[in-house]
Amino acid sequence: MRRNLRTDLTRRGLFGLTLTATAAAALPAWAQGASGGAGLDPWMGEKVYGNPDAPVTLIEYASLACSHCATFHKEIWPKLKAEFVDPGQVKLIFRDFPLNAPGLRAHQLARCAGEKRFEGLKDVLFKSQATWLNQDYEKRLAMVARMAGLTQAQFDACMADKQLENFLIQSQATGGSKYNVNSTPTFIVENTGTTVAGANEKELFEALEDAGAKRKAP
């Protein structure tokens, strides 16, 4: 069932893990030794991967606090990118679908980094998910933010950004009302209207081929 984010913002209590050097090791080059002096540049655009004129359009609704989304990002996305996106057969549109308060705050952090740094921070948050997704998630996310070059004041401003928060909540609401998305990850092949729920590589790739995408041999 889709969660009410505004209600869930007052709740705590996921998993008791601690932030380790894993997140720091996963940070891309732009974050290592970055300065936090620059102002925030929250980005509320649509992230598109691949050729905008690709014949097949795939929409992904995902949450940065979703373990199955992290599995897709780490294990399936590299294959999808190499076999469908890079050859120009598929464009993927990433849309935010935070399911709970930790997810919402993680999405805010990724977007507060700005358009150019969004992808790098999204990658870090997925790969280090086990280290920040716990009952102290805000403190852990603040540590990730500092390693990415944001000051504590910038992080606090990011978490308090109601315009950005509303943008993310609206993204979730639109996914639910327009495509009946109620879990993550959910993929919609726009050409055919086919929906694939979960990190199911076989089903997803077959749906793309059914829509006319030609798969490049691995």
Image: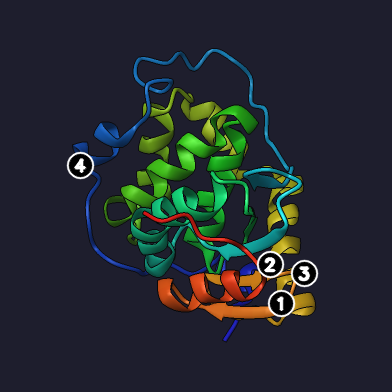
Separation of marks 1 and 2 at Cα, in angstroms:
6 Å
Amino acid type, label 4: Thr
* Relative height, residue 89 to residue 199 (above, below): above
Q: Nearer the viewer, mark 3 or mark 4?
A: 3
Q: Which mark is residue 174?
A: 3
Separation of marks 3 and 1 at Cα, in angstroms:
5 Å
- Do the CB atoms of the residues marked 1 and 4 lie less than 8 Å apart? no
Residue density around tag 3, few if under 14, some if 14–19, many if 20 or more, within 10 Å:
some
Quadrant into which the N terminus falls: bottom right
The quadrant where residue 188 appears = bottom right
Separation of marks 3 and 4 at Cα, in angstroms:
35 Å
Amino acid type, label 1: Gly
- Do the CB atoms of the residues marked 3 and 1 lie less than 8 Å apart? yes
- Do the CB atoms of the residues marked 2 and 3 lie less than 8 Å apart? yes
Q: Which residue position holds label 1?
A: 176
Residue 170 x, y percent position in the rendering: 76, 62
Q: Which residue position holds label 4?
A: 20
Q: Which mark is residue 23?
A: none
Question: Which of the two discs, 2 and 4, labels the residue nearer the N terminus?
Answer: 4
- Do the CB atoms of the residues marked 1 and 2 lie less than 8 Å apart? yes
Q: Nearer the viewer, mark 1 or mark 4?
A: 1
Separation of marks 2 and 4 at Cα, in angstroms:
30 Å
Residue 201 x, y percent position in the rendering: 42, 71
| Residue 129 located left or right of residue 102 | left
Separation of marks 1 and 4 at Cα, in angstroms:
35 Å
Amino acid type, label 3: Thr
